[in-house]
Image (cartoon, rainbow, N blue to C red):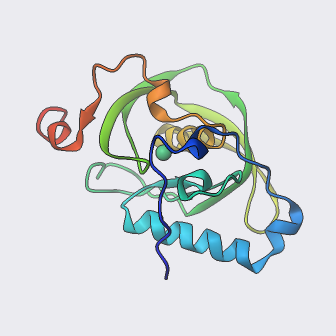
Amino acid sequence: MKILSRTQFGNPILRKKAMRVSVADLKKRSFHKLVEQMFYTMKKANGVGLAAPQIGKPLQLAVLHVHATKFRPDLEEREKTVLINPKILRYGTTGEYDWEGCLSFPDVRGVVPRATKLDVEYTNLDGKKVRETINGFTARVFQHEIDHLHGIVYVDRMENMLSLSMLKEFQKYAR
Ligand code: ZN
C-alpha cells in the first residue's frame, strides 16, 4: 500500500480550518481508500493518530489507533477509530500534563495540558453519528487530532516551551 507523504510544521495547511466531509464524499471509494492509506501511513510512522491536513488534505477527517508503543508501553489498546466531522461537546473539569509528539513535528516532544475526559460526537466510516465519553490518554489523542482540524498544533497548547525536547534528549532526560 502507498505511504502518503506528510506535511510538516511550516506548511500553511496545518494552520487552516479543514472542510467538512459531505455525505457524498463519505460514500466514495476514493474516500475509503484514503482512510486505509492514512491508517497505513500512521502505522509506518509509529503514530497513534493522523489528521487529514497532515497528509495535505484539508478535510475534517482523522484516524486514531491508540495502542502500546515503544515510548508508551503503558497504553491500553483502543480499536482503530475514524473521526469524520468530529466535535467536542463537553470538556471534563480535570486535566493533566503529559508528553506529546506529532507526526508533523518529527523527533520533537513537549508537555501539554489536556482535559482527561471529553464528550465527543463524530461520524464514523459507516456514516453513523457516534456520541462517546472518552477518558485518559485516548482523550488526549482525540483533542490533539481534533485540534489539527482547526489549524491548531500541540505546541500552541503548551503552557511554555521549557519541556520542548528533541527525541534524543527526551529519551535521555525525560524518562
Ligand atoms: Zn499531530
Q: Quadrant of the C terminus?
A: top left
Q: Position of residue 54 (x, y in %)?
A: 54, 53
At a point 60% along the width and 19% down the height, the residue shown is: 93
107 above or below 41?
above
At a point 42% along the width and 17% down the height, the residue shown is: 159
Q: Could you say which quadrant of the image residue 84 lies in?
A: bottom right
157 above or below 68?
above
Q: Residue furthest right?
A: 24
Q: Residue furthest bottom?
A: 1
Q: Could you say which quadrant of the image residue 172 lies in?
A: top left
4 above or below 16?
below
The front one of 149 and 173 is 149
At a point 80% along the width and 75% down the height, the residue shown is: 28
Q: Position of residue 87 (x, y in %)?
A: 74, 40
Q: Position of residue 97 (x, y in %)?
A: 39, 25
Q: Is residue 29 left or right of residue 161?
A: right
Q: Residue furthest left?
A: 172
Count of labels in the image:
0
The front one of 27 and 94 is 27
Q: Is residue 9 left or right of residue 91?
A: left
Q: Position of residue 45 (x, y in %)?
A: 37, 62
At a point 49% along the width and 25% down the height, the residue shown is: 157
